[in-house]
Image (tube, rainbow, N blue to C red):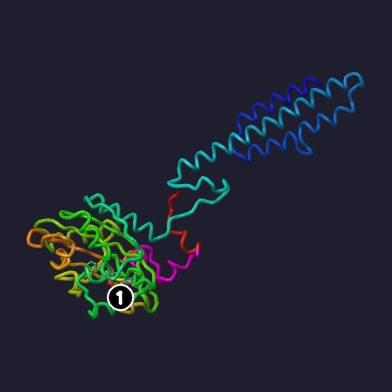
Amino acid sequence: MKSKIEAARLQFETDLAKATTSEEIENLRIAFLGKKGLITDLLKGLKDVSVEEKKEIGKDVNILKGFVAKSIEEKQTELKKAEQEAKLKSAKCYDITAPDNLELGTLHPISLVQREVEKVFVSMGFTIEDFSEIVDDYSNFEALNIPKHHPARDMQDTYYLDNGQLLKTHTSAAQNAIMKKYGAPLRVIFPSRCFRNESIDASHENTFFQMEGIMIDEDISISNLIYFMKTLLSEVFKRDVKVRLRPGFFPFVEPGFELDINCEICGGEGCPTCKHSGWIELCPCGMIHPNVLIEGGIDPEKYTGFAFGLGLTRLAMMEYGIKDIRVLNSGNLKALTQFDTRNI
Ligand code: FA5
């Protein structure tokens, strides 16, 4: 009996050293301490030993039982800690207060394209700025050459607060503050959520994301603008996408352009997403109007610049083949978690 106890201890120690997952440890517990486990068998075997031996052997079996239980508990704690540490190491961000069995999340498709675009522009010397979602009339309109009662305001109705402030209708609302903060020369991108009081359909939301970019320096021309737009699209899509540039009117640029992308949902044949036109308005842009530079404290005689307002939400739709913009604000995890393949 003594040799059986010793053999059981040796086998346990060998198996324990080999176990590397919580599941293997649990199997070990069942194999030794379970109803039909080795130690349970040893305890059952006590009935066959003499009364004199029973006391000593019983004590040995119980010591082994205690040793096995404690070792399993220790190993389980150790493994859990290692698993947690590995999770934390691979995580980009984590909530220290979250329960440790919480499933890791994924990035929203808009965050994914936003990061991609940011990477491209940062590599070209742009910095990233943040700006409030609630702004005043001056930032959203007046500083952008859109005085009160200008018809361009009709295109961008929004939600007004009692104090006269409003939810910004476009990222251009940050242009003036950024120009005043940094002066020229300047290379900045500034992504943000935007709001418009408009009818919702497959490609229009009342809450969506844009990414604005401005570059101001001596001798900046339309060729610089076209170069940066081309680089952006080829880096983000990593495949050939058809684009078209056509004249567009925005009071804060002159000349102004509309940059449209071939609808990636229907391949240009026409569908509800592109309103059957085959094209999606993606990134209006143009040369910054001298009035806007002056309002931002920059001398238009010395400096010129371009600006663009990329529709990030629509870019995410084209990148991931999302037919309906409403999916992106839906909170439908089944739909939204399938695009981020990294473990964050
Ligand atoms: C503007 O907002 C201008 N501020 C862009 C600009 C910046 C022009 C700098 C020139 C220089 P527009 O209203 O067209 O322009 O919106 C820009 C892009 O945002 C659109 O092409 C589209 O991709 C996206 N967008 C606009 N409205 C919506 C909406 N309701 N839902 C989803 N995306 C939208």
Of the four image quadrants, the one with ligand 1 is bottom left
Which residues are drawn in magenta? 314-332
Tell me which amino acid carries mark 1: Gln
Closest to the observer, 173 or 136 = 136
Give x and y (percent) for residue 191. Answer: 31, 60
Closer-to-camera residue (170/51): 170
Label 1 beta carbon within 8 A of ligand 1: yes
Q: Residue at the location (39% across, 75% down)? A: 202
Answer with left or right where residue 52 lies relative to residue 171.
right
Residue 264 horizontal/vertical position (percent): 33, 68
Does residue 21 sit above or below 187 in this rendering?
above
Q: Is residue 145 left or right of residue 100?
A: left
Majority secondary structure of magenta residues: helix
Task: Estimate the x, y position of residue 132 in percent, counting from the top left.
Answer: 34, 61
Image quadrant assignment for residue 339:
bottom left
The residue under the point 48% across, 65% down is 331
Element on which disc 1 rests: helix
Magenta segment includes 325: yes
Q: Classify residue 13 as left or right of residue 201.
A: right
Which residue is tagged 1? 156
Q: Is residue 306 magenta?
A: no
| Badge 1 density bin: few <14, some 14–19, many ≥20, Cα 10 Å | some
